[in-house]
Amino acid sequence: MTAFAYRLPWCAALLVTTLLSACGGDGGSRQNPNSLHGTAAVGAGIASGTVSARCADGTGFTDTITTEANGIWRGSLASAAALPCALRVEGGTPAVTLYSLATRAGNVNITPLTDLALALQINALSGQALPDWFADPTTGDAGLDTLAPQLASAATALRTALVNAGYTPPGNWPNGSTAPFTAPFTANPASDPYDQLLEQLGDGSQGSGLDSHDALRASFTSGGSLPQAPAGGGGNGGGTSPATVHASLTGTYSLVFYAGGGEGCGNACDFIDEQAVSVVVGEDNTLSIDGTVLDNPYHRLFDGSPHLPEIIWRDGDVEYALSSNDTGTFNEINVGDASRPQGPFGVPVFIGQLRAEQADTPAAEKLGPLAGVYAPTLIEKTVTFSGNSALTPGSSVFVEIDAQGVVTVDGYQFDPADPSYRFNDYTTNPSRPEFAYHLSIEESASQTLSFDVIVSPDMLIPVAWRLTRTTQLGGGAFSSSTIELEERPLPDEETALLSELKALGDITLTVIEDDTSYNSGYVLCDELRLSVSDDGAVNSWRYALVKASNGTTLSSEFYRRSYGRYVEESGGRRIGFLRNHLVLREDGQVEVQARFLGNLKDRASSDPAEISAAGCASH
């Protein structure tokens, strides 16, 4: 069920290891309530463009703002009371004039998406063109105070127009969201879904004869539809290509619908859990589901390449994805709600599966609902690990799970029928840092091969995997070597939070809570420095926490999905590493929270009020 399950967003139910969360810095490193920053791009970042602001109180930026080579810009207002502000970028390379709107401090983008959303809403309110509106945005029917509360409506109207034209908005842009204005992104079409959407929109415009953004805006606001998405891709790197059923799959199947880790049908379909379903895969490329015949199957494109293991049919908003079409071995049919695309390739929300009735074994019971073909990324490999193929960091490693709980990875098979097979369920113990199904087989009298299927604690959906070879050396000594796999890309909400923390630079924090029974390496009133970085490599997001007094590194970790946790909680967002949690509050302050077995132990904050209340001096 890979194409559905491994791209589902997830949040943690409970963090159970030592964790430390961080929220904002002090002075220049903390998010200033008077500051704005973001990315100006048309796909490519707009370099050396001038960003101007016209705010509700009649002021603008305190200095001249110029975009960097990648389109990133930063500016300060005279005060937070100046908001909301109309924004414009002009000049630079590529040379284009675009508009946006900032309703609060923090990230705000300036792109064709923000421009078109505003243009449509302003035209509906006042009939003005964007340049005329920007000349005096504080008055009239489309004044800033009127327009700002309608920003989500403007974004939703644009989203609807994009979907109608065949584009797939990024997964963290639902209806009712201001995401194109406020979601951080990078001008990198190889990895960022917003930038991929901008590239696709630009290609679609050129293909329809609209040779400039001004022409696109004029056509759109005069009642025209957006240009159709180019063939072979939705707006963020997805798309489909025609598919043909493997001859070995044709025939009649008696299957059962299992919601498993999915949402269940809801309003999308009519199946109930454990319902018997008759399925016919036809020689004429059709799929019959209880008598309803579907045709025109397709493969989903990932990074421009068809995902061959799954062949997909669509019935309205419901997708049926059969695997494994590339090998001709029937595994299951994943059922998804295509009205709610998510992630960078527009993968539907997972509803459930049609598969053979499940055998009564622990492996089948736990792993059967996860049946499918997965392609996780190899994140880390022990130098001494020797596998069946030349596995290198960054490569995809195919993992297959069938309905009986048989798992195949890199040619190794973990089959419950193997006399040496062992299965352990580690998803029920809240004190474990990882929630996993642990499988093992004996390769020899002295060597064991194990495979961990690491799942999200709330939905029990695979997020990471670990293949380990353990060798008995004698005298009670052992050696082990591993490969670490993760489902990539990371969920949009996680990279958005990490991007915002990275944009804050070096963040100054002060320790305001100190549980003396727990050793975090710092004590009450210590000053700390937090920084978040991303080098774009396989091991991407990393944080470093140092003691300001002597530069000692207290902790430095890469983000791992195996033990990572993301939580949207009252007052902010929190992302957990193995040792530390990083928190960005709604008010822009940053915190560091040390947690053990789910309990808060130590905390550092950038909030001057909290620092003062703890009896510490603000830095």
Image (tube, rainbow, N blue to C red):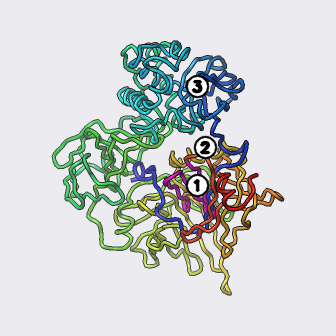
Residue 611, image x, y percentages: 68, 57
The residue under the point 45% across, 75% down is 424
- Crowding near pointer 3: few (<14 within 10 Å), some, many (20+)? few
Residue 576 part of the magenta segment? yes
The residue depicted at 57 percent of the width and 33 percent of the height is: 108
What residue lies at 26% left-to-right and 50% top-to-bottom? 266
Which residues lie in the magenta part? 562-585
> How much space separates mark 2 and mark 1, taking CA atoms?
26 Å
Q: Which mark lies nearer to you, 1 or 3?
A: 3
Residue assigned mark 1: 378
Asked if the residue at tag 3 contacts the one at tag 1, i.e. Cβ–Cβ closer than 8 Å, the answer is no
Position of residue 564 relative to residue 219, above or below, is below
Type of the residue with mark 1: Leu
Secondary structure, mark 3, is loop
**Which residue ends up furthest to the right in the rendered image?**
550
Q: Secondary structure at mark 2?
A: helix
- Circle 1 SS class: strand
Label at residue 104: none
Q: Position of residue 517 (x, y in %)?
A: 66, 76
Kindly identify the amino acid type of the residue bearing the numbered disc 3: Asp
Q: Quadrant of residue 49?
A: top right
Identify the residue under disc 3.
57
Which of marks 3 and 1 precedes in the sequence?
A: 3
